[in-house]
Image (cartoon, rainbow, N blue to C red):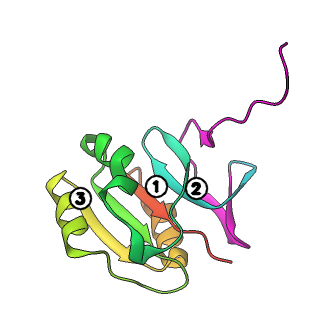
């Protein structure tokens, strides 16, 4: 093996309910992740977003790529509900997804219920401290 440690992008290749959130991260599938996450049909991915006021289309490129498999996108904006910019909401809807914005806690609970019902749900969850 050649030199050093290899750091890979955070990715869990499957769908799983979120077991816990807080302390800057999430627990799912007997794992933990520090930071925000995207829960998509392709799996659970680390997500660089941290401030809902700064979200743009670039933060949702992977979500838009998987939009055919997503009926509803839940966006968890941290401790409290923060609206998405109108142009971003329009772009996500244009991709074919219903978009619901709520606090991260509410988004986690809603995601888990819809996932258990085997709905075509995805979630973009900003970590809370």
Q: In the rendered structure, does residue 39 fall within the stretch colored magenta?
A: no
What residue do we see at 35% from left, 53% from top?
58
What residue do we see at 60% from left, 40% from top?
11
Give the quadrant of the N terminus: top right
The first of marks 3 and 2 along the sequence is: 2
Measured as percent of width and height from the top left, residue 46 is found at 58, 50
Q: Is residue 66 left or right of residue 51?
A: left
Q: In the rendered structure, does residue 23 fall within the stretch colored magenta?
A: yes
Q: CA distance from mark 3 to mark 2?
A: 23 Å
Disc 1 target residue: 115
What residue do we see at 27% from left, 46% from top?
67
- Residue found at the far top of this picture: 1
Disc 2 target residue: 17
Q: Is residue 60 left or right of residue 90?
A: right
User: Where 7 falls versus 122 (above or below)?
Assistant: above
- Residue found at the far bottom of this picture: 80
Q: CA distance from mark 1 to mark 3?
A: 20 Å
Instruction: State the image quarter where residue 60 is shown.
Output: bottom left
Q: CA distance from mark 1 to mark 2?
A: 7 Å
Magenta region: which residues? 1-28
Say few, some or many: other residues with alpha carbon within 10 Å of mark 2 (under 14 / 14 to 19 / 20 or more).
Answer: some
Measured as percent of width and height from the top left, residue 77 is found at 46, 76
Give the quadrant of the C terminus: bottom right
Does the CB distance between marks 1 and 2 fall below 8 Å?
yes
User: Where 89 falls versus 115 (above or below)?
Assistant: below
User: Where 78 falls versus 121 (above or below)?
Assistant: below
Callout 1: SS: helix
Measured as percent of width and height from the top left, residue 59 is found at 40, 56
Disc 3 target residue: 92
Callout 2: SS: loop
What residue do we see at 38% from left, 65% from top?
74
């Amino acid at each position: 093996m050649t030199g050093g440690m290899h750091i890979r992008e955070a990715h869990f290749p499957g769908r799983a309910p979120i077991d816990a959130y807080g302390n800057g991260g999430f627990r799912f599938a007997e794992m933990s992740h520090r930071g925000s996450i995207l829960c998509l049909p392709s799996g659970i991915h680390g997500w660089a977003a941290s401030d809902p006021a700064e979200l743009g289309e670039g933060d949702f490129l992977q979500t838009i790529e998987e939009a055919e498999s997503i009926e509803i996108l839940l966006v968890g904006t941290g401790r409290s509900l923060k609206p998405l910019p109108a142009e971003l909401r329009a772009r996500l809807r244009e991709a074919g997804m219903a978009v619901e914005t709520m606090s991260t806690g509410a988004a986690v609970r809603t995601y888990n219920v819809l996932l258990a019902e085997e709905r075509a749900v995805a979630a973009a969850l900003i970590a809370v401290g």
